[in-house]
Amino acid sequence: MRRILAITGRETAFYGAVAFFVIVCAFPFYWMLITSLKTNSDLYNVTNIPFWFTEAPTLEHFRYLFEQTLFVRWLLNSLVIGLCVTAITLVTAIPAGYSLARMSGRNGEALGIGIFLTYLVPPSLLFLPLSRIVADLGLQNSMWSLVLVYPTFTIPFCAWLLMGFFKAMPPEIEEAAIVDGCSLFGAFMRMTVPLSLPAILTVVIFTFTLTLQEFVYALTFISSSDQKPVTLGVVTDLVRGDVFYWGELMAGALIASIPVAIAYNLFLDRFISGITGGAVK
Amino acid sequence: MAVIAESARLAVKPVSRFRFILDRRDVLGSIFIAPAILYVLLLVGVPFLLAVYYSVSAYTLYDPTWRFVGLANFEQIIQNPVFLETLGNTFLFTFGSNLLGLIMGKFGALLLLRPFPGRKIVRALIILPWAVPIALATIAWEWMFDSLYSVINWTLIALGIVTRDDAPNWLGSPHLAMLCIIIINAWRFFPFAIVIFLAGITAVPQDVIDAATVDGAGFWRRNYQIILPMILPIVAIGLIFGIVFTFTDLSIVFLLTNGGPSGATSVLGFEGFQVGIASGDVAHGAAISLFMLPVLLIVVIGMLRFIRRREI
Amino acid sequence: MAAVSTRDIIKKFDEIPAVNGISLTVPDGEFMVLLGPSGCGKTTFLRIICGLEKQTSGDLMIGGAVVNDLPPRARGVAMMFQSYGLYPHYTVRKNISFPLRTQRVPGAEIERKVAWASQMFGIGHLLDRRPRQLSGGERQRVALARALVREPTALLLDEPLSNLDAKLRSSARQEIKQFQQRVGVTTIYVTHDQVEAMGMGDRIAVIDHGQVRQMGTPSEIYDDPADRFVATFVGTPPMNIVAQNGGYLGFRPENFLPKAMIKDAACTEFKFRVDRSEYLGSERIVYGVLEGFDPKQAITAKLPPAHVADEWIRPGEWHSFAVRDSALRHFDQDGKRAGRH
């Protein structure tokens, strides 16, 4: 009997701890959801229980967000930026990762670490000179400046990710293709690229999410509302002076968060093996 | 047999050497990596040098001359007590939130290691803070810390811990504001720490753990003498990310406190932004940002060494 | 099809030679086996021939032309890899036709050749499957078909049987040899397995430390080893070697017999102390030492089991054994065969 009590106690503690972690992690997002569906009179009444609806839920904030703000435009901007950056990243990082894994000999590893380290050079060190470069190129206040600058961190990251993947691939298939009459480039295009589609898909997803998460460059380069990506647009344009449009803010934040959250969960394992690649053999 | 015999072709065709220049591994390898390196050199290397140059010039948005002033900017910055406070804030913010994140990460990883019904969903929910753009999450926290409608305060009052009159003004008092940005950053970092720990622990071969168990090692000994040393390299990599991105972060501070109240939460990245972009004093802004560099270098070099040594 | 020959090929990795001056000629249509322990440089040498590695120095000739600077696709050789290297994202048909497509062979001819190859290897029913749906034996046939469909100048095989279990191996061995004879392609086969080498090779080159220790027909290698390495690498159990008069004396276990069994010829007698004996059904292996020689030098004898009863061989007993003089091999102090050519 005492044993059963002890086990029950331990189980309760365990699930209690799990519940604590889940609440800590997920509550802000629950709070986004509940806020975005509440009427303003419900929101701004401190006597109401905040965790649930006192008045009937409303889609008013979402309607306002989509009809009275540039939210749709921001989403589109983010999509265009994401697509362009992904294209640039793929075209440069796939060959680079392959070169590091297969064709750079002993310098490959040092070069790979060097490229990866540039991923660690923070935006807050570079935004001043970059904003000047962007201005010189006539891209000031335009989302194309972000298309130009975002590959500076997506390329190193993805080249590193792909390098690890290519290294883990047995070279035999490419070699067979080379002996069977392909050039090096031909073997790369006809064997390596199709066989690494899962890795390439991972890279696409993560490039996209990295562009969505970026904030500092967007904040520095862009002030016109119609050029903003969604992350910047939501947190800057839904605040007028000192007035926070909390319902709209939370609705926008929620919508912009969902795709990234889903992508991370689907590709988490690949991502982890990518950044830690080589540290554990 | 006859089929292939009749179409037998010359064994080896005579060809010029140049035609096969792209079949040399080193040549194609250089061509393959050139675009990536060029991109990084032009848009990371050049701006970096430019930042160094700004920091020793008198360049501002209003006076865009490139007058060389030596280390004058750095001297002025160091002599400014506000900057020293900023520097202190940055260290406090970085180490506080990473330590908190790491502890929570280790604890969370121990929980998630054990299979239980719904583990997949729990993991998906726990990943959220790290996955979602920090700017958006910060806005949600700002709303939770709101001076009037804070859900946290509402709960504290409902539980009878504080009264409405002395409810904490989270973002309005210096110490609490610092605590807030530390908590938010730890909150964002610890899911990453969890997955790093999990990846490390799952990579430890089961037979090593079994052998230790057979040899009489208990739970704590297994954890701290067998598993922890083996996953240290992977944890070190996680920490590099955590420290570098925290030390240079400015979005949380920018959105949540704007450096306030009265500079209590100002950190290096934010200060560089305020001076360089908002006030247009590019030279001083660049110099402030460059103060991050030594710390970054020490962290990265130290960690890389550490990883190297463990690999051998 | 063409002869393959090399002249003093050297390949260094970081100043360490993996291949250290190999010169050999494989005449048109010959089945040459490169036999050696793992890490002896035989695979590197094979990769140099097909062009996947470039030699540090030395010349490589295919069909009489020097091909040192040609990439693999201009050499026209085919290679079968250890795990076959089939293209997982292609069907069997596309796998087989791949070497033809890279050479821009016209479509009709591709179809004709694929039909020919699939008929020859009996894989017509597999053409629309993918490699992962095939058994080990089927994969080997597909790999062979892919290698031979374009009529290569030479066929290179890199330990192709090492992924098969013991049972499949002997039939696979037979299959490869049979197709090679039918097509008549110049073949270079790399292995560390002496049974494969002895059973398949027209000639064998025994390689160690990046050098050819001996080249010859299987019987030359076995009966007439050029040095101690070859003598002890080929044969199970290996040749017995004992020190004698500043040189070495060697004899094969199956030639080391009880004195009573040798009646007709001149022979050399030894006192043999039995330590242990193993009955293997078709033979009996007896382990022991010789009187008057290094007592740590273990000697083995391979006896036909029917001739010796169990009671006769008991551990600790001394027996009179002998070797026909014609079966004795003498090596000098460097391990080279004494008085040979």
Image (tube, coloured by chain):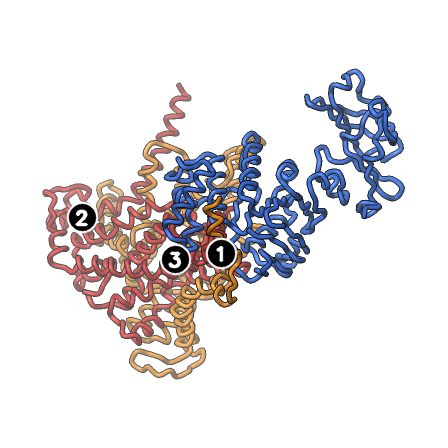
Chain colours: A red, B orange, C blue
Name the residue: 24% across, 50% down.
B144
| Residue under label 2 | A35
Expressed as whole percent of the image width and height from the top left, the position of residue A140 reads 26, 72
> Which numbered tag is attached to residue B246?
3
Please give left or right for residue C209 compared with residue A205 in the image. Answer: right
| Residue under label 1 | C73
Please give left or right for residue A146 compared with residue C333 in the image. Answer: left
Front residue of C171 and B130? C171
Q: Is residue B103 above or below residue B17?
A: above
The residue mark sitting in front, 3 or 1, is 1
Front residue of B289 and C220? C220
Between the C-alphas of marks 1 and 2, the distance is 65 Å
Q: Determine the chain carrying the residue at label 1.
A: C
Name the residue: 51% across, 54% down.
C76
Name the residue: 31% across, 69% down.
B274
Give the residue type at disc 1: Arg
Q: Is residue A82 above or below residue B80?
A: above
